[in-house]
Amino acid sequence: MEKTTRPKRSTGKFIFLLIVLVAGFFILDFTNNPARNLVAPDFPDPASPPVLGQTSYSGVVHGMNGSEVPMSRFKDKVVFLNFWASWCPPCKVEMPNMQALYEEVKDENDIIFLLISNEDREVVQNYMASKGYTFPVYTGSDALLQNFGVSGIPTTFILNR
């Protein structure tokens, strides 16, 4: 008679522990994430899409030096508007491409890069410095996110003059 071998129980325990560990990291990341309110569980209502030409330029953003910059300053420009956060994996993936695009058009007077994070200014400055990004970034508020109907990040708009 041939002897059949059973799979070792330690393999099953290892897989179980791995699943618990990964789930724990996701739970910890979610509960410790100060900017998690930027990500909404629902998609925007497709029955009420943004209407071309009705972009509101109300509100202000804050530059990295702390100055208030009114959104109305950008009204007569083509604006590359991106809402992002340093903790957001998809945001991190798209940043090098945004840097490359910025390098191509930074000398154009009628094109503005407006990248807005809801994080503390120091967090944003440290992230930008650690990655070597040179495009302009600003901090914004929840009201600004609501003004543009942002329910998750990253979200990018191209605003025409």
Image: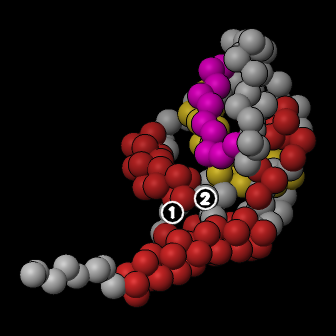
Q: Residues within 10 Å of mark 1 (few under 14, many from 20)?
A: some
- Does the stretch in magenta take in 13? no
- Local packing at callout 2 (Cα closer than 10 Å; few below 14, some 14-19, many 20+) is some
At label 1, the amino acid type is Tyr
Question: Residue at horizontal 62%, vertical 31%?
Answer: 157
The image shows residue 103, relative to residue 110, as above or below, that is: below
Which label number is shown at residue 88? 2
> In this picture, which residue range is highlighted in magenta?
152-161
Q: Does residue 33 appear left or right of residue 67 in this picture?
A: left
Q: Is residue 136 left or right of residue 140?
A: left
- Residue located 47% across and 50% down the image: 94
Query: Which residue is most to the left?
Result: 1
Residue drawn at 43 percent across, 78 percent down: 12
In the rendered image, residue 140, in percent from the top left (x then y), is placed at 81, 50
SS assignment at label 1: loop
Q: Is residue 141 above or below residue 76?
A: below
Which amino acid lies under the numbered mark 2 shown in the image of this protein?
Cys
Q: From this viewpoint, which residue is outermost toward the front?
A: 1
Badge 2 element: loop
> Of callouts 1 and 2, which one flags the residue occurring earlier in the amino acid sequence?
2
Q: Which residue is mark 1?
A: 133
Looking at the rendered structure, the number of numbered marks drawn on it comes to 2
The quadrant of the image that shows the C terminus is top right
Q: Nearer the viewer, residue 72 or 9?
A: 9
